[in-house]
Image (cartoon, rainbow, N blue to C red):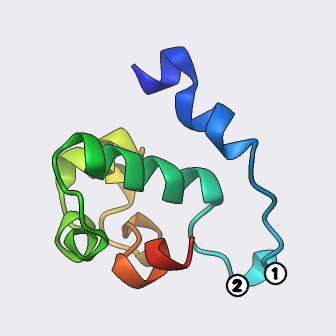
Amino acid sequence: MDKKLGITEKFDNCFQDHRHQSYVDHSVHELLAQRLYGIILGYEDVNDHDKLRHDPALKIALEKLNELEDKKGWLAGKSTINRL
């Protein structure tokens, strides 16, 4: 539904990413989507994302499931999302 409506993409356009891209593992769009999807799933607290980062369904939603074996398949943890 998010891809069809472009909700996180529109929300992402409100942010400017000033991070040095060589150190970035998760785009602002991915962080926003992960946080919003977590809230929609009933996980209101940021600390829940340390468990959710390993959830296969969330990885599918964020198109990270095919990269399970390497670091790029990891979702953001609570510390990374908190800095957003």
Location of the C terminus by quadrant is bottom right
Q: Residue at x 67, y 32 (%)?
A: 10
Q: Position of residue 53 (x, y in %)?
A: 27, 67
- Say whether residue 8 is left or right of residue 71: right
Q: Residue at x 21, y 64 (%)?
A: 52
Q: Position of residue 38 (x, y in %)?
A: 28, 51
> Label 1 is placed on what type of residue?
His
> Label 2 is placed on what type of residue?
Tyr
Q: Position of residue 33 (x, y in %)?
A: 46, 47
Mark 2 nearby-residue class (10 Å; few <14, some 14–19, many ≥20) = few
Tags 1 and 2 in contact by the CB under 8 Å rule? yes
- Say whether residue 6 is left or right of residue 49: right
Q: Residue furthest front?
A: 44
Residue under label 2, please give it: 23
**CA separation, marks 1 and 2?**
6 Å
**Looking at the image, which is closer to me, 61 or 17?**
17
Q: Specify the label residue 20 is tagged with.
A: 1
Q: Residue at x 83, y 72 (%)?
A: 18
Which image quadrant for residue 16? Answer: bottom right
Which image quadrant for residue 75? Answer: bottom left
